[in-house]
Image (cartoon, rainbow, N blue to C red):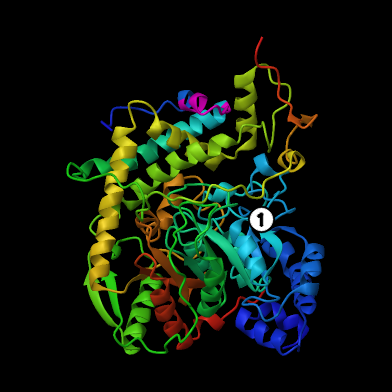
């Protein structure tokens, strides 16, 4: 592998070279820096970079550690000491993180090197990264199209070979949907599998941190490092973390896969449907049994999601008051003017819309009708999955109903944007785990656009979805395709 | 959720302590009315026998040892303050 080709490598490939001392961590960082200089002016994946701090860490890193010497790109919602953490919002434009999030502390302890922060929808609210208040991120497969979101910078960086792997966050599909739209692997772990300490809260009963990578094995390796109990996050589950990478099988004998009747909906792009149907046949050829399952409350998931997520967001974002950190409006006439202008000037349109909706559904007289009812329907959605997972190991579906769309195509109508998450929202509501892996391409306007296959597994059963995804990946070529940037 | 209630965006924004421009008020009024109309579909579901979900995965009574750990120095805690002096956050006068 030439130095220039290093950023194209997987963690597995680089690790072999690092451990044989054929390359040094410093060379990996330098090659990455050169690649970013070359392609990021066009792609716009990164919001900030600090190769000086990274180079210092590289000098002393222990290459025998699980991620020794591997640079990892970090979504700009996760705190890394001394680095900006803008959440792509004007309100945090000058913020510098005073501490490491637990996931960063764990990555460092495993030898990984954070070096840059990636673009996103403001406060992770969006499905296209167009809600970033800082800049656009372009899809490396077609720069006229969105990379998906909200973890759009992280996926674009991996797809454009300007990151080896990355961290993202997923509240309603924000890891899986952009992974699908850019042809990379993305994992939303079980709710509580990974600590959120040091991750700016959007919707606290839904948010999870997870990996984005070029191979299933790389994601499994990262999850093993970042998962596990944390005294700083009481929602983080005190459950053992299995070895996700050991002895991944190459066949699927004995695996039971479910196709949800309710996922056969209108509005799924025919090329997406064809690719997923073909992927299901391939999974069967590897030995998996496929049966139909039912998730009867699927059609209510998006409505439930936009009540629960906005309600929680309106409470979480109350902390941005201009007092202790963040943007502050100048020369207020009184306290209400101080808060009103600080927040009015600091937040972008989608964040404002969601704060208003969330405030409304929690407000006196509406709480029972909206929030309480939504939490009850959420329980029915959770029970649907629990019943389905009595019969199957994983539920197979498209990750996104459509391939990457064009800039501006959905921004005028928020509801249309919300519907982009139709196959991913319910998994967050139920707290289960899910992965998106590349499974084909759509041909649109003469461009190849990646299609993602989603596998959802029951809570804490990440190991099973890694096994299925790995067997699929290793017997197909989709994950090897890269855009010609 | 009777369907007859209309969200008053200007009023709710005031509750959320967040100023909106006149153009934002008008745009959000239309967009959020559409979203609320969509959300109305939850009325179809019979939830009379359902307990509201509280946690996706049940967790009870998370305890830790009552010991002190690392904490910020005053300087670190104030590092991002919009205004500060004498190890304090400076805010506009709010009491006459």
Q: Secondary structure at mark 1?
A: loop
Q: Which residue is mark 1?
A: A100
Counting other residues with Cα less than 10 Å from the Cα at mark 1, is it few (<14), some (14-19), or many (20 or more)? Answer: some
Q: Quadrant of the N terminus of chain A?
A: bottom right
**Percent position (x, y) of residue A141?**
59, 70
The magenta stretch spans residue B18: yes
Q: Quadrant of the C terminus of chain A?
A: bottom right
Looking at the image, residue A10 lies above or below residue A300: below
Q: Which residues are magenta?
A: B12-21
Looking at the image, residue B13 lies above or below residue A312: above
**Percent position (x, y) of residue A283?**
35, 83
**Percent position (x, y) of residue A414?**
46, 45
Please report the residue visible at 33 percent of the width from the left and 42 percent of the height from the top: B39
The magenta stretch spans residue B55: no
Q: Is residue A92 left or right of residue A309?
A: right
- Per the picture, the main secondary structure of the magenta-coloured stretch is loop
Please report the residue visible at 51 percent of the width from the left and 68 percent of the height from the top: A186
């Amino acid at each position: 592998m030439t130095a220039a080709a290093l950023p194209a490598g997987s963690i597995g490939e680089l690790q072999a070279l690092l451990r044989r001392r054929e390359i040094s961590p410093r060379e990996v960082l330098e090659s990455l820096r050169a690649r970013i200089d070359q392609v990021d002016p066009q792609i716009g994946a990164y919001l900030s970079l600090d190769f000086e701090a990274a180079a210092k860490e590289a000098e002393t890193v222990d290459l025998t550690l699980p991620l020794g010497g591997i640079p990892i790109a970090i979504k700009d919602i996760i705190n890394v000491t001394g680095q900006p953490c803008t959440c792509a919002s004007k309100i945090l434009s000058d913020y510098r993180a005073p501490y490491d999030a637990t996931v960063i502390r764990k990555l460092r302890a495993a030898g990984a090197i954070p070096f840059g922060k990636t673009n996103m929808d403001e406060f992770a609210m969006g499905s296209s990264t167009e809600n970033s208040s800082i800049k656009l991120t372009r899809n490396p497969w077609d720069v006229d199209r969105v990379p998906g979101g909200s973890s759009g910078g992280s996926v674009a960086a991996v797809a454009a070979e300007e990151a080896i792997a990355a961290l993202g966050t997923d509240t309603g599909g924000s890891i899986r949907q952009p992974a699908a739209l850019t042809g990379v692997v993305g994992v939303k772990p079980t709710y509580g599998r990974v600590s959120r300490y040091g991750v700016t809260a959007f919707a606290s009963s839904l948010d999870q941190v997870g990996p984005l990578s070029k191979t299933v094995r790389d994601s499994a390796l990262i999850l093993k490092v970042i998962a596990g109990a944390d005294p700083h996050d009481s929602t983080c589950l005190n459950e053992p973390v299995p070895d996700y990478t050991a002895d991944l099988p190459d066949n699927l004998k004995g695996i039971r896969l479910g196709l949800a009747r309710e996922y056969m909906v209108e509005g799924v792009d025919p090329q997406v449907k064809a690719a997923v149907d073909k992927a299901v046949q391939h999974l069967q050829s590897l030995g998996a049994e496929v049966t139909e399952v039912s998730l009867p409350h699927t059609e209510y998931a998006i409505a439930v999601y936009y009540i629960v997520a906005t309600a929680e967001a309106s409470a979480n974002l109350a902390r941005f008051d201009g007092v202790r950190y963040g943007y502050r409006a100048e020369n207020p006439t009184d306290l209400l003017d101080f808060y009103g202008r600080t927040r009015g000037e600091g937040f972008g349109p989608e964040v404002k819309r969601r704060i208003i909706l969330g405030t409304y559904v929690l407000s006196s007289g509406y709480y029972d009708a909206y929030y309480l009812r939504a939490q009850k329907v959420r329980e029915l959605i959770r029970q649907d999955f629990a019943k389905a997972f009595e019969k199957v190991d994983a539920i197979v579906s498209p990750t996104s109903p459509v391939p990457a769309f064009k800039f501006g195509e959905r921004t005028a109508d928020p509801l249309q944007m919300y519907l982009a998450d139709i196959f991913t929202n319910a998994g967050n509501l139920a707290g289960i785990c899910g992965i998106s892996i590349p499974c084909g391409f759509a041909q649109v306007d003469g461009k190849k656009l990646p299609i993602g296959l989603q596998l959802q597994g029951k809570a804490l059963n990440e190991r099973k979805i890694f096994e299925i995804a790995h067997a699929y990946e290793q017997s197909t070529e989709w994950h090897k395709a890269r855009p010609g940037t | 959720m009777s369907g007859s209630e209309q969200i008053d965006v200007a009023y709710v924004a005031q509750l959320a302590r967040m100023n909106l421009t006149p153009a934002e008020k008008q745009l959000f009024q239309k967009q959020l009315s559409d979203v609320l109309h969509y959300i109305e579909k939850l009325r179809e579901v019979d939830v009379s026998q359902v307990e509201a979900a509280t946690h996706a995965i049940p967790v009870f009574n998370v305890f830790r040892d009552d010991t002190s750990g690392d904490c910020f120095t005053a300087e670190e805690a104030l590092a991002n303050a919009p205004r500060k002096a004498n190890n304090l956050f400076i805010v506009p006068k709010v009491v006459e």
